[in-house]
Amino acid sequence: MEDSSGTSPKIELECLINGVTEELPLQRHDLQSPDSATRKSFCSNQQFHSMNALEILQETIRILRYNSSGFMIIAALLICPVSAVVLSNVLVDQSIMKRLTIRLLLIARSSGLPLKSFVKSSCQRLSEMTLSATFCFPMYITFSLLSKAAIVYCVDCTYLRRKFDLFKFFSIILKIWRRLVSTYMWVCMVIGGCLALFLVLLVAVCNIFSILGCPSNLIVYPAILVGLVFSVMFANAIIICNLAIVISVLEVVSGPQALLRSGVLIQGQTQVGLLIFLGSTIGMTFVEGLFEHRVKTLSYGDGSSRIWEGPLLVIMYSFVVLIDSMMSAVFYFTCRSSSMETAEEDGHTLVEAAALSQISLGIQ
């Protein structure tokens, strides 16, 4: 009798836990997309697990090797044209860029900043980025957005062990294009709002130190500190926006809901996302610098090397963009897996607590 009475609470606990955990997949069904049970991680042929930035890069290379033809078609038809226009700045009016740079320099001088080479190059770079984003917006919202959706679809096909089907992709993109454009417009507003907030804060901080009587050489240091803080915030915003584009392709959400969903998924994975963003930014900046000094600015020879260096750098830039978009898609699956594991652990904890409380009430 003592044995039976001693083991019955344990048996009852296991029965209650098993009975409730059988209902958990139904409760978590909204976290999973259709056919998610057939998606396997490429590195171990098992279900997805949390990865660091290096593991995500390795997974991306494996996916690229498995479905190389599909990704090369996407890069050649959709990414390379945008890369060529962005690197060459062929759509940017140089006269407008000079006027905008002068306006920014006047604002910097009125805020108390010294017009050193660093400030001048920063103003010129900011005006160039702003005008490039404005004039290239039609290409961004068509070619670039279509390439991101195609890359996400191709990564998903690879996880399902399927080849990229161009006709099926276009049939899918017709259905999701409206929510994809909606998400992209919200992404543009978020990024534009972050840049506007940065400029307002920078001018306000510089004016405050200028009113306090600080010399212009010392005002540079608070401005640099504001820039560093903004860089971290802006990097997080870019990560959330990139993940929102992936979410709008794979899930039935768009606009602010996709951004909120992205913010929830990225919890606990921010460091991995920052490393991915840092690596992609370094790669793109490196290729842009090479294009600036080897193609735009003739620094050696008679210029004949531009014939092959220009297209080569465009291909290199397109490859970095391709890898960045693929890593964002892989990062989505790892973030979703991590959030599901956390929800499962919390669910088991709640189940055990409920089972123990029922057993204690039964014993009493």
Image (spheres, helix red, strand yellow):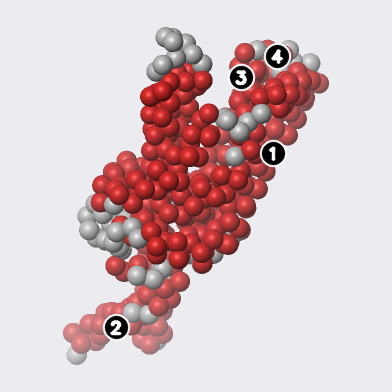
Cα–Cα span, label 4 and label 1: 22 Å
Q: How many marks?
A: 4
Cα–Cα span, label 4 and label 2: 73 Å
Which residue is rendered at x = 64% and y = 18% of the image?
A: 119
Cα–Cα span, label 4 and label 3: 13 Å
Figure check: 280 above or below 209: below
Residue type at mark 3 is: Ser
Cα–Cα span, label 1 and label 3: 20 Å
SS for dot 1:
helix
SS for dot 3:
helix
Kindly give the residue lying farthest to the bottom in the view shown: 1
Whichever of labels 2 and 3 marks the residue nearer the N terminus, that label is 2
Whichever of labels 4 and 2 marks the residue nearer the N terminus, that label is 2
Disc 4 vs disc 3: which is toward the camera? 3
Disc sitting over residue 121 in the figure: 3
Quarter the N terminus occupies: bottom left
Cα–Cα span, label 2 and label 3: 69 Å
Instruction: Confirm whether residue 226 shows in the render.
Output: no
Whichever of labels 1 and 3 marks the residue nearer the N terminus, that label is 3
Disc sitting over residue 15 in the figure: 2
Quarter the C terminus occupies: bottom left
Q: Residues within 10 Å of mark 3 (few under 14, many from 20)?
A: some
Q: Is residue 330 left or right of residue 258?
A: left
